[in-house]
Amino acid sequence: MDVATFTRPALPAATLAFLLFAMVLPSVRLRRRTGRPALVLHRSGPPLQRVIGVGMALFMGAIVLWSAAHLAFGEQTLGVWHVPDALRWSGWALVAVGFVFTVRAQVEMGASWRIGIDSDRTELVTGGLFGVVRNPIFSGMLVVVTGMALATPSAWTVMGWLDYVLLVSLQVRLEEDHLLRLHGATYQRYAARVGRFIPGVGRLEAPGLDAAPRITV
C-alpha cells in the first residue's frame, strides 16, 4: 500500500483516536476521580490564557476539518506536496510515538492533569516521564502535530504546525509562572535539572531565593 492510499482513511481515524484517548477519556477519568472538570482554560489564569484557549480550540477544529476534507476530496484538491514516501511514513511513525507518549504522560499526571491553569492547588508531578522533560504531554502532542504535518505536507499543515508551536510555547510559560508561584523553590529545583520539552534543554536556572528566576532557551 502506498502512503497516499494509507493516509486517506488513516488521518481521520488518527484524529478521532487522539481526541478520544488524549482529550475525552482523560477528562472523564478526572471527573470520576475528583469530581472536577478537566477544562479550565476558560475560567482561570491571566487574560492571555483565554486567548490561548480560543487558539487551541480553533486549532483542534482545523485538524478535524483538514482530516475530513482529506478523506472527502483527496490530496490533490487540498494541495498536498509531492515529497518522498519515506518522509511521509516517518511522519506516521512520529504520530504513533507521540500518541503513546502523550497518553502515558497523562496517566502519570493523574489527578493533577488539567487543560489549562487551575486556580486550585494541584500536586507537582516529577516522576516517570516528568523526570525526563517537564512537559511530556505537550512534548508528545508536538511530536503528533509534527508527524501529521509530515504525513500530509502542505502550506496549510506547515502554518498549522507553526501556530501550534507558538500556542504551546506561550501556554507553557504561563504554566511555569503559575507553578513557580504555587510550589516555589521545589519547582525551581525541579526545573533546574529537567528540560522543558527536550531533555536538558530549556532548564530553569536556579538563582538564590531572593533573585528572580530566569529560563534558559
Image (spheres, grey):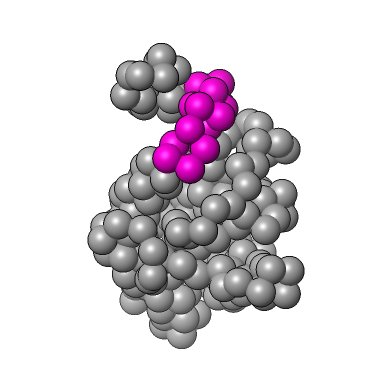
Q: Is residue 79 above or below residue 183?
A: below
User: Residue lying farthest top?
Assistant: 208
Coordinates of residue 96 in the picture (x, y in percent): 65, 54
Q: In the rendered picture of this protein, how many numbered marks are placed on residues?
A: 0
**Picture quarter containing residue 127?**
top right
Residue 97 in view of the camera:
no
Coordinates of residue 6 in the picture (x, y in percent): 61, 67
The quarter in which the C terminus is drawn is: top left
Q: Is residue 173 above or below residue 188?
A: below
Coordinates of residue 55 in the picture (x, y in percent): 31, 65
Residue 184 is inside the magenta segment: yes
Coordinates of residue 101 in the picture (x, y in percent): 66, 48
User: Residue lying farthest bottom?
Assistant: 72
User: Residue lying farthest front?
Assistant: 210
The quarter in which the N terminus is drawn is: bottom right
Describe residue 127's horizontal placement relative to residue 121 as left or right.
right
Residue 183 in view of the camera:
yes
Residue at 62% of width from left, 54% of height from top? 112
Q: Is residue 131 above or below residue 37?
A: above
Tell me which secondary structure the magenta stretch mostly adopts.
helix
Residue 138 is inside the magenta segment: no
In the image, the segment drawn in magenta is: 180-197
Front residue of 176/54: it is 176
